[in-house]
Image: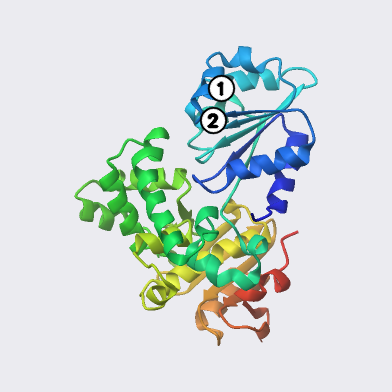
Amino acid sequence: MVERRTEVQAVLDLLKRHPVVGIVGARQVGKTTLARMIVERGRRQTEVFDLENPEQLARLHDPMLALKDLKGLVVIDEIQRVSDLFAVLRVLADRPRTPARFLVLGSASPELLRQGSESLAGRIAYHELGAFCLEEVGADRHLRLWLRGGMPRSYLARSEPASHEWRRSFIQTFLERDLPQLGININSTTMRRFWTMLAHYHGQTWNASEFGRAFGVADTTVRGYLDRLAAALVVRQLQPWHENISKRQVRAPKVYVADSGLLHTLLNLRTRADLEGHPKIGASWEGFAIEQVRWRLGAERDECFFWATHAGAELDLLVVRGRTRIGFELKRTTAPKVTPSMRHALKDLKLDRLDVIHAGESSFPLAKRIRAIPLSRLLMDLEPLA
């Protein structure tokens, strides 16, 4: 068991301020386990509905009748299975003194759970639960976390083969069962081929025309595939930053498989030796490091960007909060150096500083406002955003 104290406290704080709190995250990322931890910490009367359990699903045949007299904390797992619940929760959330707080769990982004956004506008706060991070497993285990990914059952598996086998099974089940339950009715073979192709483009700029030609469909069709996997939280899009400067800038997003373990399985990389010899090792490390930096900073996804110009200058990660701008380069090397691209980014984007996250062991200054930080020391040398 990995304690997720920060995640538990974040949700408890939201429950103090909002009548309804939604925990969203990919399938098997640990939402139910987190809810159980919250129930144990909350010390209040609790009622739990798991909508994958037919008996408990039947209890909500008439949601208003089942929920209106409950007090304390009401947990509803896999809420996307009963669409009528959102309208009922709106009515219950508006009652005076709010006798019950509702914690709802869903395997999709708030955008996909559109009914929740519309029916509960102003009443619900969402917390996105990601996979395990360095703070939860320990920085000394960063190589295991990178290879296996942060999905709990993959990371905690007894062996590398067992971890790989779990991920293979997850991918098959996700495509054949979970996506249709989210209302995404695309042939599982087509979606697996698309997801695998995305894995080979991990860390690259999205090119709809190239994907469309490969699948023999319109650009808008493959864009729809991408948006659906992103809405199911198994693919990430890092948006480009546009600055009003006299340089042509890249305007398409970068795409990443959200979990490094799933990326490695889609690329059929079973061991660290397989990964070390694969041409996507640098991109895999970059995507993994970006997620760890974002989590450590406490940055929201809409505060994170990349920057690139058609002349070749680029920045792997730009974090913008208010007037603060911090740049990051992710280099899988033990001897990082200052590059012209870094100097361009520092000047053109008016960065407060630029950190180079590398695979070595020591932190040290590289130049004025540029420093090197090893991933293994991220928790010690990188401060969260204010």
**Residue count near mark 1 (Cα–Cα under 10 Å), binned few <14, some 14–19, many ≥20:** many
Q: Is residue 180 above or below residue 354?
A: above
Q: Quadrant of residue 165?
A: bottom left
Q: Along the horizontal axis of the image, is 129 left or right of 180?
A: right
Residue 67 placement (x, y as % from top left): 65, 18
Q: Along the horizontal axis of the image, is 204 left or right of 362?
A: left
Tell me which residue sits at (72%, 62%) in the image.
Answer: 384
* Of residues 30 and 375, the one drawn nearer to the viewer in this rendering: 30
Sequence-wise first label, 1 or 2: 2
Residue 73 placement (x, y as % from top left): 72, 29
Q: Quadrant of residue 42?
A: top right
Residue 153 placement (x, y as % from top left): 52, 54
Secondary structure, mark 1, is: helix
Q: Along the horizontal axis of the image, is 358 left or right of 194?
A: right
The C terminus - image quarter: bottom right
**Mark 2 — residue?**
79
Q: Which three-letter amino acid code belongs to the residue tagged 2? A: Ile
